[in-house]
Image (cartoon, grey):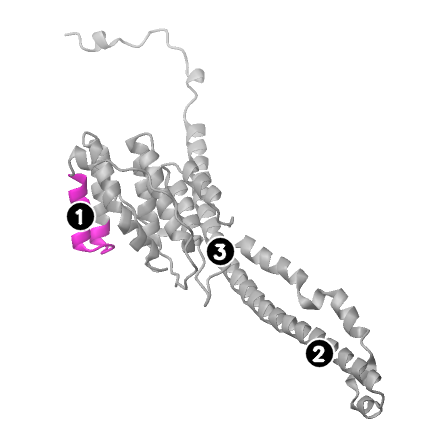
Amino acid sequence: MAGFSESALDKRLNELNGSAQSIQTVSLWLIHHRKHYSTIVKAWQSKVIEAPDSSRKLVFVYLANDVIQTSRKKGTEFGTEFQKVLVPVYKHLSIYKGDEKLFKSLNKVVNVWEQRHVYSSAFIQELRNALDASDSDASLEPVTKKPRESREKRHSETEVIERPDGTKEIHLTLSPRIPPSDPPETDELLKALQDLENAASCDAAVRERISKLPPEISEVKSVEDLTDPVMMQKFITQVNEAMLLLSEYNKRLSEEMDERRNVSRMLKDYLLSQEELLDQAQQRLEEYQGKLQKIYQVRKELENHLNNLPDLTRLPTSKNPLPSAGDLFKR
C-alpha cells in the first residue's frame, strides 16, 4: 500500500466518488495510515467545506462513516478526532435545508451511529441540533493542517459494516492486524535500511586504521621493555590514540547493533502486515471471482434463453394481416 504523504492524501480525497467501492478503498487506505489521524481528519473537514455541491459533501460524510465504524476495533483515535469536527461540519451542512435527500441521508448516518453506540446519546443530539442550526450559525471556514501525530500501538479486527442505507456487508479490510509495534511506512523502512549503509561495520576507513595500529600497544610485555622516557611518552600517546579510536568505534558498533535490532523489528512488523494485507486481498479476490462467475452464469443463461426464442423472421407469412386494435373491439 502506498506510503502516506499530504499530497497522497489530497489525491485520494480528490479521486473519491460516491460508489461503495471507492468509499471503501479510500477508507481502507486512511485506516492503514491511522497514525496520521489528526492530519487526515483536518484534511477531510477542509474537503467537506470546499466541496462544490451537497452531493459531493455527502460522499465525504459517507467516507467518514466508513472510517469511523471500520476503525472502531483498531482504536478510538479516528472516532475521537472526527467527534471534534462533526458538529461544526453538520452545522455547515444545515445550510442545505431544502435538500431533502441530503438531510435524509445525514440523519440516517446519525441513526446508525446511535444504534451501534458509536457516539453517546448526548453527542448524537448535538449532531441533530446542528442540522437544525440557523443560517447565521452554519458558516464554517476551512481548517489549517496540523503536524502529523506520533505512532501509537493499536489492535485490529475486521467487522460487519452497516451502511447508511441500512444494508449490511462483510467488510474485508485491507488494513493489517497490528503486531506489537505499529508497522512502519514503506519509505520509513527504506530510510532505515539505507542508514545502515553508513553504519560502523561498513566504515572501511576506520577498520583500516584499526588494523594498522602497532601490535605492541596491546601487549603488556611491551611496557616492561620500555626504559627510555621519550619512547615511553611516545608509547603512551599511541595507546591513548588507540583507546580513543577503539572507544568511539565500539560506541558506533553498539549503536549499530541497536539500529539493526530496530530494523529487524521493523522488517518483522512490515512483513507481518504485508502478509495480512495479502491474505485479505486474496479473500477479496476470491469474493469478486465468485461474483464474476455468477455474472458469467447469468449471461450464459440469458444467451441460452435468447437462442431458444423463435426467429420471427422465419415465421410463415400470413396473407391475412393481423386485426387492428379497432377491429378487435368492434361490436
Q: CA distance from mark 2 to mark 3?
A: 50 Å
Q: Position of residue 311 (x, y in %)?
A: 43, 21
Q: Is residue 42 visible?
A: yes
Name which of mark 2 and mark 1 comes first in the sequence. 1
Left or right, residue 134 beside residue 261: left
Residue 278, magenta (yes or no): no
Q: Name the image quarter holding residue 91.
A: top left
User: Quick check: 283 above or below 14?
Assistant: below
The label number, if any, that marks residue 277 in the structure image: 3
Q: Hey, what amino acid is under mark 2?
A: Met
Q: Residue at x 42, y 36 (%)?
A: 14
Residue at x 46% of width, y 44% of height? 6
Q: Which residue was labeled with disc 2?
A: 243
Q: Which amino acid type is shown beneath numbered disc 3? A: Leu
| 197 to 257, vertically: above or below | above
Q: Residues within 10 Å of mark 1 (few under 14, many from 20)?
A: some
Vertical relation: 228 (above or below) 169: below
| Residue 205 image point, x, y percent | 76, 65
Mark 3 vs 1, N-terminal side: 1
State the extent of the magenta-drawn residues as a range.
113-132
Q: Which residue is mark 1?
A: 126
- Residues at marks 2 and 1 touching, judged by CB atoms closer than 8 Å: no
Badge 3, how many Cα within 10 Å: few under 14, some, many 20+? some
Q: Is residue 117 magenta?
A: yes
Residue with the most extreme front position: 229
